[in-house]
Image: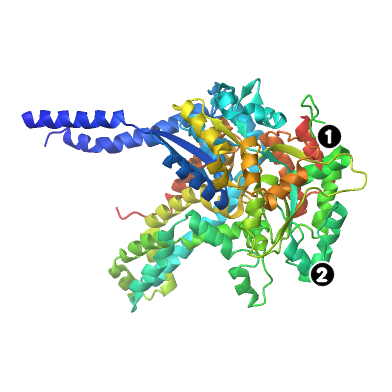
Amino acid sequence: MKKIISIFVMFVLVLSGCGANQTKEIRFSWWGSNDRNNATLQAIDDYNASQDDVEIIPEYYDYGSYQTKLSTQISGGSEACVLQVDYHWINDFGADKFYDLNEYSDLLNLAGYNQDLLNTMNYDGKQVSLPSGPNVPVFIFNKTTFDKAGIEIPTSWEELEAAGPAMQEALGDTYYPFSTLMPYDLFYEYTYEATGNPIFDEDGNFNWTKDDILVGLNEYQKLIDDNVIPSTEQAPDEMTQGDPQWIDGEWAGALTWSGSVSSWQDSLQEGDELVVVPTLSMDGAKSTGKVIKPAMSYAIADNCEYKDESAEFLNWFVSSEQSTLDLGMTRGMVDNPDAIKILDENGMLEGPAYEAYVTTKDIDAAPMPLLSGDTNRVILDGLSNLRYGSKTPDEVADDIYAEFTK
Amino acid sequence: MSKKTPYIYLTPWLIGLVVFKIYPMIETVVYSFTDYSLMNDPQFIGLENYTTLFQNPKFMTSLTATLKYVILTVPFALMFGLFIAFILNFKIKGVGLFRTVYYIPSLLGGSVAVAVLWQTLFLYDGPINNFLQLFGVEPIGWFSDPNAAIISLSLLRLWQFGSMMLIFLAALQGVPEELYEAAQIEGASKLYIFKRVTIPIISPVILFNGVMALIGAFQEFTAPFIITNGGPEYHTYFLNMYIYEEAFTYYNFGYACALSLILVLIILAVTVVVFALSKNNVFYSD
């Protein structure tokens, strides 16, 4: 009996000793490709090494599975303290799930940010998250493949259309000057550029006529018919960075977000050159066709136990010299003024991501419109119908118009 | 040992059954009558999810795709599994090695890794098309042609026939030899013996494998999710994919629960029909 009591007392003493020096574990979750993940892990290691009582625990996934994981975590209240979130997720998750970063306005130097970009993540006065930097759709082309085909990099929609037959004639029918990445955004950019009408007006009402929709669909059909976009046999689905046809240069172009240009460059064969074309021109364009959103943003969960420590980590992550040097441009162009200065002083403002930023920073871009699941789906399904030849542009336009006006 | 002892030993399993099976099933039924987006509290809406479901063309598209897959896969899986088991029941040299080799695909299972491998094999310029081209066959759009897409998924399920084959093999080895001897003495042909002796004797096992294959086929998810993503144009958009997308992409959790319940009822109905048909076709030794 005495033995049991003494063991119990020792056990309690050990436990209380542990509690006295308990490290504050703060989980940080994000999505990314290999270059971003490795850079972020390095930054986290550096931060942890500098802290006595705080430890950042990393959790990272690819984009698709991250959203699913995060939604179930948030619904169950088990999300990480510091979260990387996408622009439209706040609508899905609810602004009440995130802490108001205005409480850390001075620490995070919110006044130093691009206020238009900051306001994209402000819901009724609550700063829900901190945008990392701007994201604008840009065109990327594998110059090595274009050079092989003897074709100039397209700078207009007309040149892109002509590049389809020219590339196949030069290199064979497995080569295409473009790919199936971001079909909705491609369709939207053309339609907005040609008509000058965003999909929603300032009051959030659907703003397109059926003729507006047909403008974009007819162009998409032309890209299919002219072999600009790969056939359904070769590309049944949307392209990914892991597709061998992209890596090998057979699919030689795409529309992608400016913040992810670095990772697309990294996925090419060594020696292949990627060029960024900010926009494709067209005769009679009514607008630039461009939209803008934060590349990603960082939030603190409302139920986070260590909000102060999380904010300090967040501030270090987005503005410290060590973190900026670790991360470079792997998270796209940053918006934090301190980080920009550090990158500039260290000659790191270079590469495809910076090029994408420089060429788009002065472009007139509208805030990216937010679509519901059903409306987004009907456009994607319609573009798929065109690729598979199961519907005409007119029929798809009817479907889209009906969904948005029901 | 007291009378309570067995129940004490059963308790961990019972707790697991209640917590991980029964409670979630009850919750699913309850949520199916609510508008629940995962992020907010569920709101009771009665039968609205069910009326929406039956009016949604996507449900019929998904159900049609699932039924096509079931009809294509289950009979061929049974026939193929039984055929291989029959061959492996012969007393030939090295049969043990062959039994092991044919079982290996089942060990690999329907995992994500296998699905990614399958997707690579059936690419337009992948090994399967390259092999077929040796025989003058034009490349097939395995993932772009609606019929080919279902076939490519069915082939993956058929490839994993090992478990079914083993169960058939055990059943075949349980058929009394004297029945075969008696039939041979009476002058029955091999085909007649197979139809009139072997099949009736192993009919309970055929029923078991058939029901398990049916349930598995109705619940298929990994292969269409990884390989075809429900395409082309929803031709492989099986019910489980529809449920997953509604729950975790569109956050229509209540609607997804209603879909889950409908899937359970469909599987139940099909199983009941199969058991009803088995009364005159399955022969038990007792």
The scheme the figure's colours follow is rainbow
Task: Answer with mark 2 or mark 1, whichever residue precedes in sequence.
Answer: 2
Q: Residue at x 83, y 65 (%)?
A: A166
Q: Residue at x 72, y 48 (%)?
A: A356
Disc marking residue A169: 2
Q: Relative to A145, is B90 on the left or the right?
A: left
- The answer to whether the residues at label 2 and label 1 have Cβ atoms under 8 Å apart is no
- The three-letter amino acid code for the residue at tag 2 is Glu
Quadrant housing residue A203: top right
Q: Residue furthest right?
A: A284
For residue A182, say whether it is visible: no
Q: Residue at x 34, y 36 (%)?
A: B17
Cα separation between marks 2 and 1: 38 Å
Q: Relative to A185, is B115 on the left or the right?
A: left
Chain ID of residue with mark 2: A
Q: Residue at x 15, y 33 (%)?
A: B3
Q: Nearer the viewer, residue A30 or B143?
A: A30
Query: Where is residue B178 drawn, in percent x and y?
Result: 28, 69
For residue B165, say whether it is visible: yes
Q: What residue is disc 1 on?
A: A208
Same chain under badges 2 and 1? The reply is yes
Say which element carries label 1: loop
The image shows residue B136, relative to residue A399, as above or below, that is below
Q: Residues within 10 Å of mark 2 (few under 14, many from 20)?
A: few
Q: Quadrant of the N terminus of chain A?
A: top left
Q: Nearer the viewer, residue A35 or B265?
A: A35
Disc marking residue B229: none
Q: Nearer the viewer, mark 2 or mark 1?
A: 2
Q: Relative to B198, is B273 on the left or the right?
A: right
Quadrant housing residue B47: top right
Chain ID of residue with mark 1: A
